[in-house]
Image (spheres, rainbow, N blue to C red):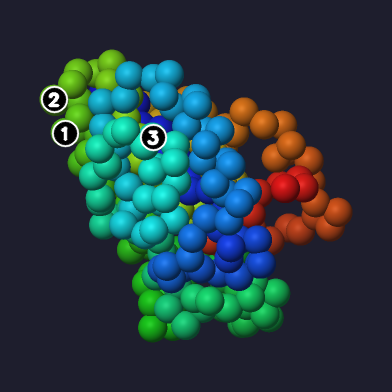
Amino acid sequence: MATVLLLRHGRTTANASGGLAGRQPVELDDTGRDQAARVGERLRKLPLAAVVSSPLIRCRQTLSIALPDVAVEVEDGLIECGYGDWEGQPLKELSKDPLWPVVQQHPSAVVFPNGEAMADMSARAIKAIRDWDARITAEHGAEAVWVACSHGDVIKAIAADALGLHLDQFQRIVADPASITAIRYTPTRPFLVRLNETGDLASVVPPKRVESDAAVGGGSGGGAV
């Protein structure tokens, strides 16, 4: 089967300000555009069979900078989780919500107010990736490599599935802005080939205050940016 490179979009204005963008039309900030340009230098060295994107503008912007001459196909199944009433809210305020510890410890039970269930997000994203991977394998062969640009929680859910983890464990996974997580599917099992690869060790430097809680939505990345 083919190998998919799950690319998280570059940093956005919402990431930088500590807000939860959700499906709002937030765009890349200057750091995010620089991240997209740098990851593009790496991706352009590969023979990409296809490039697929979430419909949200921050993903399409990332790809337009990273791979400006490549046709991009939009896949609704890769859209960000529908956080409902949480969208646009500061993460510092959301951390006081009674739903927050459930998101952290038991996300498979979470349904966001006027939004989406995290289990539904996981299921539709995994289906989208597996369907595309099967199609690309059929058209281009098992050696094909392709890119899917999406969002932090979506990529973490797909990676958790590849590792055979229950969704309740997906908060242990990190997907920084403009990172690549590579998965190779086979007839019997997926292989996680890369996880949160940025080519930049700055992302492994922890912030001044290390939190046990996962960054809902994916966060702005580790270290100073």
Q: Secondary structure at mark 2?
A: helix
**How much space separates mark 2 and mark 1, taking CA atoms?**
6 Å
Determine whether, in the image, residue 142 is placed left or right of residue 206.
Answer: left
Q: Amino acid at mark 1?
A: Arg
Q: Tell me if label 2 and label 1 are in contact, CB under 8 Å.
A: yes
| Residue 129 in sight from this viewpoint | no
Is 209 located above or below residue 192 in the figure?
A: below
Determine whether, in the image, residue 141 is placed left or right of residue 170.
Answer: left
Which quadrant of the rendered structure holds the N terminus? top left
| Label located before the other in sequence (3 or 2) | 3
The residue at 76%/58% (across/down) is 211
Q: Secondary structure at mark 3?
A: loop
Q: Residues within 10 Å of mark 1 (few under 14, many from 20)?
A: some
Query: How many marks do you count on the picture?
Result: 3
Residue furthest toward the right?
208
The x, y position of residue 175, in whole percent, is: 56, 45
Q: Mark 2 = which residue?
A: 139
The x, y position of residue 144, in whole percent, is: 27, 21
Which quarter of the figure has residue 158? top left
**How much space separates mark 3 and mark 2, taking CA atoms?**
21 Å
Which of these two is toward me, 175 or 220?
220
| Label located before the other in sequence (3 or 1) | 3
**How much space separates mark 3 and mark 1, taking CA atoms?**
22 Å
Q: Mark 3 = which residue?
A: 67
The residue at 66%/67% (across/down) is 17
Q: Amino acid at mark 2?
A: Glu
Q: Residues within 10 Å of mark 3 (few under 14, many from 20)?
A: some
Pair 3/2: label in front: 3
Q: Mark 1 = which residue?
A: 135
Q: Secondary structure at mark 1?
A: helix
Which of these two is toward me, 208 or 123?
208
Q: Amino acid at mark 3?
A: Leu
